[in-house]
Amino acid sequence: MWSPLNWLRTQVLGVDLNEEQKRADEAHAFFVEDNLRLYDEGKWTQAQYEMASTNVESAYLRDVAGDVQTAAVDSMKQTLATGSLFDPLLNPFKTLLKQIPWWLWLLAAGVVAWKLGLFDLAKRRIAKLS
């Protein structure tokens, strides 16, 4: 069933969570039937069947959308706790600015001060004091 929320979620995540839940259910059913078939045919012992069943149950995603939401909330909590919300955006600029040598920063500050007329202002104040 189409809904705006499902469409938006699909656009943001790049995957339809309802379809993923269907795939998880189908895979779970397949592996449960396959394990039972191998046990019934005598290819597996009781211990092997129980271990395989335990593995299938532990790997089964019962709530794909809930798992995605929990992971997103946990990630956001961690991001906010570390204060790194904008780090992915700022890191390239920080790296670029760190590559500029200190003397070039000093030269740039001097040019900006000259363009703003701060040297003329300082010259006038010194002349006024004399």
Image (cartoon, rainbow, N blue to C red):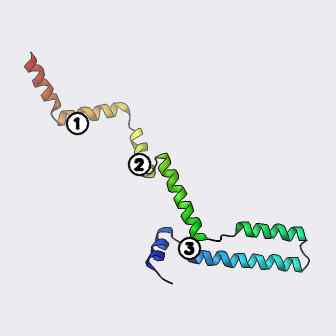
Q: Nearer the viewer, residue 111 or 37?
A: 37
Sequence-first disc among 1 and 3: 3
Task: Specify few, some or many for label 1: CA neighbours under 10 Å numbering under 14, 14-19, or 20 or more.
Answer: few
Q: Nearer the viewer, residue 13 or 57?
A: 57
Please state if 122 lies on the left or on the right of 9 as rendered: left
Does residue 51 sit above or below 83 in this rendering?
below
Q: Identify residue for label 1.
A: 112
Please state if 71 lies on the left or on the right of 86 as rendered: right
Tell me what residue is drawn at x 59 percent, y 65 percent. Answer: 67
Please state if 22 lies on the left or on the right of 2 as rendered: right
Sequence-first disc among 2 and 3: 3
- Identify the element where label 1 is drawn: helix
Please state if 2 lies on the left or on the right of 52 as rendered: left
Q: Nearer the viewer, residue 111 or 121?
A: 121
Q: Identify residue for label 2.
A: 90
Residue 17's label in the rendered image is 3
